[in-house]
Structure formats: structure tokens, C-alpha cells
Amino acid sequence: MTERPDRDTTATPGGGATARRGGTTAGPVIEVRDLWKSFGDQEVLRGINLTVLDGETMVVLGPSGCGKSVLLKHVIGLMKPDRGSILVEGNELTGLDGRELKDLRMRFGMVFQGAALFDSMTVGENVGLPLKEHCGIEGDELADLVEGKLGMVGLAGASHLQPSELSGGMKKRVALARAIALDPDIVLYDEPTTGLDPIMAEQINQLIRALQRKIHATSIVVTHDLHSAKFTGDKIALMHEGRIEFVGTMDDLRNSDNEAVRIFIARGYASDHRTAWESRGERQ
């Protein structure tokens, strides 16, 4: 992976930052254009349009069941759309063959909703798996790299532990370390604070933001947690019933007269606040 140039940032009205290279506004890294996806007769994505700029953290916010995780799986190529287009730095994702898609995924890191650690492996083996499988790194070099990634998420010295010995928050941290093992250009987070108590959720939010400053990756964070969105995102995209209803800063979100935005904010979505709208569960 080539080293990225340093970025300057310009503050946005919502308190976030717009990434810049060499003093010029950054260009798009991910472009989703008129994306549609159905499962049987159920339309889940209904003409999604979304652009994420270089170095930007875009939060896709919305209630469970609105299609956020399905969108994320399309961005990384785990699902294929019924129609529409996904561009990664101008390259069409949906038409790639297996080898091309595998190569492209090397540029991505993903934090799955349930951490998705391998129970039969130690913490160190989980974090080191991408380095070993994709780069052939082993021995002391692998151990040093793993320890460095664990140190970045506040888990230095934990490589010998088993996933069964970890708290929910620690598992999320290990998942973060594994996601950044290959120094990705793009990091995707699927509900990173779900299932955590408020204190641990706040720590994970802070860690996500700190990692963004360190690795300068372009990121998409999927969440139904309004507080998490406020803390981690440069921009917010509100998703409702398979469509993007709004894109802007947190201040823009608060001041919007869009009906879906007003309903979402009025219901005060947070990690420990569930309503009938959410109870349908996230579509797989």
C-alpha cells in the first residue's frame, strides 16, 4: 500500500471536516448511483444515490430495517444490485469478476455488526489473519504488526487472549484492529455501537474518530444511533424505507424540514431506545 499524502482539513458547519489534498477539495472515492435491490417482492434499496469524498466519514443513519446494512454489503461487493452503479475511485464495482473484486477488497477494511471474530483463534491470530493470508507475513514480523494494530485500539498485550475472554467492547476493538490490519484506504463500519452499554459505546465512538485522524481513510459508518452519528460523522445521510432522504452536516440535519428527518429526530434514536419502527430488525 502506497503512503497517502498528508491531508489538510476544513471545518464544516456541523463540526466535522472535509478532506482536502494539497489545498484543493477532495474528489469522490465512492459513488452510488440509482441503486436498487429486492428480495423476492420486497424492495429494500429503492434508487440510492450517495457520494463519499476522499478522507470523509459519511454516516448512513436510519432505523433498523431501512436497508443500511444491505447498502454497505453492496459497497464492498458482497451483494450485487438488481440495477444501478457503484464506483470506487471511478472504477465500476458491479461488473468486476472474482479476481478483480478480491483485489479491490484489499483496499477495504470492514467492522461487522457482531465483531465476527473467529472463536477458535486468539486475538492476535484474528488480527493477523489478513496479513498472513493476503501478504504472507509470518513470525516475528507478523507479531510486531499485530501488536502495533492492537496498540492503536488500546489493547496492547492482549494478543494471547481468546474471544471468549473478552467483553463486548473489547471484541469491537479487536474487530477494529483487524479491519485496519492492511492499512485500508476505505473502512466500513456496520452498527459499531450496537449491543454496548452507553459508556462503552462512547469509547468506541471516540476510538473510531481517533482512528480516522490516524489512518486518514475514507469511511462509511452505518448506525441508528443519533449520538454516534453526531460524534463520528463529517456528513450524515439519512436513510428511510430504502431511500436517502437527506445528506448534509449535523447542523443541516437539525434544521431540515424534511418529514423523515423530523420524525427520526423526534423519536430520539439512540442505542438503548427502540420503537416499533425498529422492531422489524435489520434486513439481511
Image (cartoon, rainbow, N blue to C red):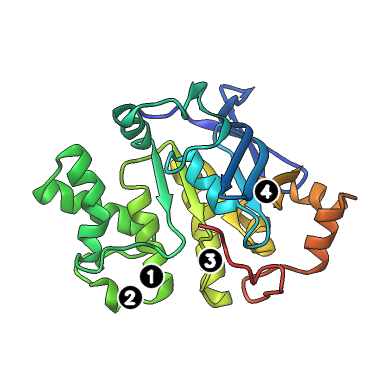
Looking at the image, is mark 1 or mark 4 nearer the viewer?
Answer: 4
Q: Can you give x and y, in whole percent of width and height, for residue 239 in the image?
A: 69, 50
Vertical relation: 232 (above or below) 168: above
Nearer-the-camera pick, 65 or 109: 65
Question: Type of residue at label 4?
Answer: Gly
Q: Residue at x 83, y 61 (%)?
A: 263
Nearer-the-camera pick, 114 or 148: 114
Question: Type of residue at label 1?
Answer: Met
Q: Can you give x and y, in whole percent of width and height, for residue 28 in the image?
A: 59, 27
Q: CA distance from mark 3 to mark 2?
A: 16 Å
Query: Callout 1: 10 Å neighbours few (<14), some, many (20+)?
Result: some
Question: Type of residue at label 3?
Answer: Thr
Pointer 1 and pointer 4: residues touching (CB < 8 Å)? no
Query: Callout 3: 10 Å neighbours few (<14), some, many (20+)?
Result: many
| SS at circle 1 | helix
Q: CA distance from mark 3 to mark 4?
A: 22 Å
| SS at circle 3 | loop
Of the two numbered discs 3 and 1 on the same chain, state the one appearing first in sequence. Answer: 1
Residue where numbered disc 4 is placed: 242
